[in-house]
Amino acid sequence: MCRDQPSPASSTGPPCPSKTAAPSHPPQQPYFAPHRRNFTTPCKYIPFSQERESHMHLRLALRSVRIQKTNIINSGIGRQPFSSPLTAQTRQFTMTQKTQEPVITSITDLPTSEAKWVTLQKITYTDQTGKSRTWEVASRKTRSAKSGVDAVAMGNILLSPPSSKRPPSTMLVIQYRPPLDSYTVEWPAGLIDKDETAEEAAVREFKEETGYECKVLSVSPVQAADPGLSSANMKMVMVEAQLSGDEDFEGEEAGKHPEQRLEDGEHITRVVVPLAELYERLVEYSKKERFIVAAKLFHFAAGMEFARTQKYGIW
């Protein structure tokens, strides 16, 4: 109700724009301004109770959005609420879909001061003849203080239910590796976290990359990864996992597999291969354009094939 219109109940309503001198500053709008945008007719005073009710609805809506957003964050695997800082053991998983083939856009020299994962070092040593020599080496910055080992690879045996009558198999992973500009065929592998053992890292990494729980069968001694180039080392952990029986041996990502827990930037394809066919399948992959088989996996398969086919009384 405008002040110029008599009302026995109230005379405190806002003045009508048509009968009031223009103020020196814009009039203060109520919370929901759209209620007062039509100034061609006498303005309508918004009762305080109505304004408060609208304000309350807005606050409830915003609170609902915040709750839903918090629930989404908290339900994500490995994520923490916004109020909790990420610890060294917190792993963030962001599942993204492949939309194109990877392309290298540039290769430049990297100052060691800017390197996050590796560093270059010059080793000066005295050889077996007493002569002083130097050697250039790449070293990881992430070696686990607890295990003294950089990484772990999981040689794995997958067992199907007896009713499926499927032979023992193994899970391969295929992922793009920028240093080679190729897709590598590997066993699941990963870096060991700061406070992990090789066994703990193997179980965690196998779950993240394949989706399967596993049981550790054996752990190798420390192995050199590339001794002529790097000080990086690793352990091979043999694990066993049970298949559900719905998986298909044919094709990449065929059948039903548990959900992976991949980090941002990881795109890993899973392939189940019968152990008896492993060597032949790896040879087939090595012939594909832009594919290369990881050395440790091929060595394992080649050793099995050599022992099976050569007559040295090994088997």
Image (cartoon, rainbow, N blue to C red):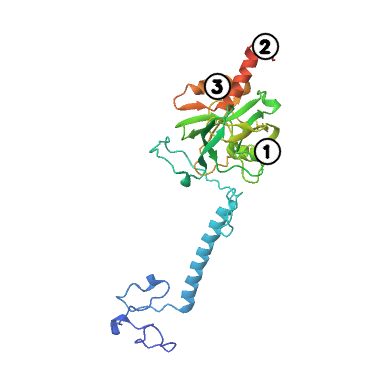
> Badge 2: how crowded within 10 Å, few (<14), some, or many (20+)?
few
For marks 3 and 2, give the one nearer the viewer. 2
Asked whether residue 211 is in view, the answer is: no
Q: Which amino acid is tagged 3?
A: Arg
The crowd level at tag 3 (other Cα within 10 Å; few <14, some 14-19, many 20+) is some
Nearer to me, 222 or 76? 222
Q: Choose the circle earlier in sequence order: 1 or 2.
A: 1
Distance from the alpha carbon under mark 1 to that under mark 2: 34 Å
- 104 and 235: which one is in front? 235
Residue type at mark 2: give it: Tyr
- Residue identified by numbered label 3: 281
Q: CA distance from mark 3 to mark 2?
A: 24 Å
How far across and how far down the image is residue 27, in percent?
35, 79
- What residue is disc 1 on? 199
Residue 312 has which mark? 2
Q: Secondary structure at mark 1?
A: helix
